[in-house]
Image (tube, helix red, strand yellow):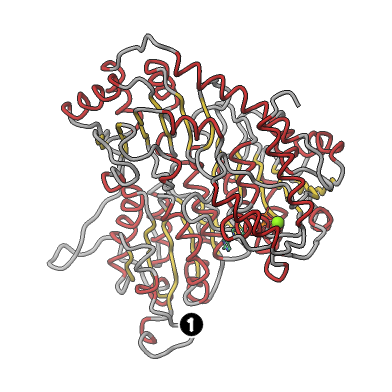
Amino acid sequence: MSQLVADYLLERLRDWDVHRIYGYPGEGINALLGALDRADGDPELIKARHEEMAAFMACGHAKFTGEVGVCMATSGPGAIHLLNGLYDAKLDHQPVVAIVGQQARPALGGDYQQEVDLVTLFKDVAHEYVHMAVHPAQIRHLVDRAVRIARSERTVTCLIVPNDLAGSPVVEQPPHEHGTVHSSIGYSPPKIVPAELELRHAAAVLNEGERVAILVGQGAQGAADEIVEVANILGAGVAKALLGRAVVPDDLPFVTGSIGLLGTRPSYELMNGCDTLLMVGSSFPYSEFLPEEGKARGVQIDIDARMIGIRYPMEANLVGDAKETLRALIPRLEWKDDQSWRERISSSVAEWWKVMERRAYDDADPINPQRVFWELSNRLPDGCILTSDSGSAANWFARDLKLRGGMLASLSGNLATMGPGVPYAIAAKFAHPDRPVIALVGDGAMQMNGLAELITIAKYWERWSDPRLVVLVLNNCDLNQVTWEQRVMEGDPMYPGSQEIPDVPYARFAEMIGLCGIRVDDPAEIDGAWDEALTADRPVVLEAIVDPDVPPLPPHITFEQAKHFGAAALAGDPRRGEMIRQSLKQMADALLPNR
Ligand SMILES: Cc1ncc(C[n+]2csc(CCOP(=O)(O)OP(=O)(O)O)c2C)c(N)n1
Ligand SMILES: [Mg+2]
């Protein structure tokens, strides 16, 4: 029997199957911390170095388990720190509950220390459900609703608990009288399938198509078999949005890989050449990488009707679970006799992988980052989980890794924030301590937050049954992704004042705190370094000194982009010579098949 509101709140979370809370202490949650201590590890507090990281970890937990992720922070500054991680979860449609402290009720409204209007602060990020408890009898239904709404709406919810209330005597069951609420736990996702008429309509559109393209996103997770079956029946190619990176394996000949600026040429050709688009569980935003309006007929499957028909004009709108809806569609689809479209796609995919290999082995100063990813690709352990930060790593994560079935992968898809690479990886290790995890992170992101979260890894790693967690750091002393954006999108030269960042000894730092550190600055050492990192007896920071002048080439270079590139060079880009030399080499790899 719980004594205090704080104990009961944790008990209720436990009843909801929440066994881990990522957080950071502070006065506003002192009563909750006492209760966490008494809870004896269930739920347990995993302490990040910063509340934003705790929110990223909760998001990572949700992404890699499908469960709700929970984070906790104190009032005022702690609550404010959570926000970016919560927005990451919100924009990527992940169920995350934030539990936030508040100053004592008698002080509220008194310009008290650390008093921030938290309901208003969280009103946007957690608009589906944000409430501050003012009475102990609310706790049961506030927890129940925060968790259930987060799960059913796949979004962020927030529960604000003044510290004095958390330390008050519990009221588990409100009295049976007017003005009370009587809630219960439990949520199981419904089986949602579209209406018969819409399924028939969709099947007709797909059957009439001669060149079908499929685009899958994270909503198609768990539906790989159905997607492959539909692709086989329709003779289609399958492209993947970044969040759907691991939905279907890359070793199938008709999987064209990532789509978009960070995507592949076969995906670009698939979208340009198709006459019918089937989009499953994706809100991929960039219309220039989808078929031109009117050139293709569209069918979309999404569990959320709000996300239907907003990226490409669709003829058939299937609101439903990806797997169930595809299953309902399959018996209505007709095998295509003409395999020429399929063959075109497959040969373009085969050629593309050769281009990727050639690009990876172009020499650079000192290391070509693609080679680091290519050699990782060849030795990805079964069942591994990959995380990528925002930065040039996301390009190579999108293009150079051949993911196989059974792997998981994610990054900040919609917010595209820097910072989640390391905290996602930590959450992946807690959720799946028996699986190897690899984080792919830029030096800018390491300096922003990753270095501090190595301390979290050092604190906890010995609990993981398989200790393998490799943080690859791309040390290029540059905020490289933005450097290239400035050149190619704006036509501006690289601006050292904003782009250069200090050289920091990442591997040595790892060693200083008890982890393994490996530094490579010679391409010949990369494969040995990966072998060492992937068999180490503890987490590893693999620091690769990489060339910032290797361009993250888009799958298709527009005239505007080429013009901007030229303008940047003419405007006196400080690395003009190398940038041009590397770009020409990389482009030539795609033009000269037998170079
Ligand atoms: C929080 C945040 N700040 C800024 C950006 C803009 N941004 C995107 S990628 C990037 C550069 C990342 O640099 P680094 O981590 O060193 O990776 P690199 O591109 O050099 O490999 C920046 C500044 C962002 N996405 N998120
Ligand atoms: Mg960098």
Residue that lies at the very extreme toward the left in this rendered image: 178
Q: Which residue is at the front of the view, 275 or 244?
A: 275
Q: Is residue 470 above or below residue 90?
A: above
Residue 296 location (% of width, % of height): 33, 32
Residue 454, visible in the rendered structure: no
Horizontal side of residue 271 vs 422, given as left or right:
left
**x 65%, y 46%: residue:** 552
Mark 1 lies on residue: 114
Q: Is mark 1 on a helix, strand or loop?
A: loop
| Front in this rendered view, residue 31 or 56 | 56
Residue 520 lies left or right of residue 260; in this view the side is: right
Residue 85 in picture, x, y percent from top left? 50, 60
User: Hey, which residue is sitting farthest top in the picture?
Assistant: 337
Residue at image location 30% in from the left, 33% down from the top: 298
Say if disc 1 is inside 8 Å of ligand 1: no
What residue is drawn where x is 66% and y is 42%?
438
Relative vertical location of residue 595 with respect to residue 49 in this rendering, above or below: above
User: Which quadrant of the structure image shows residue 274?
Assistant: top left
- Amino acid at the residue labelled 1: Gln
Can residue 373 be seen in this snapshot? yes
Of residues 439 and 239, which is closer to you in this image? 239
Q: Where residue 102 sits: x, y (%)?
A: 43, 76
Q: Is residue 521 left or right of residue 119?
A: right
Whether residue 356 is situated above or below residue 419 in the rendered picture: above
Give me the residue at 44% from left, 44% from top.
288
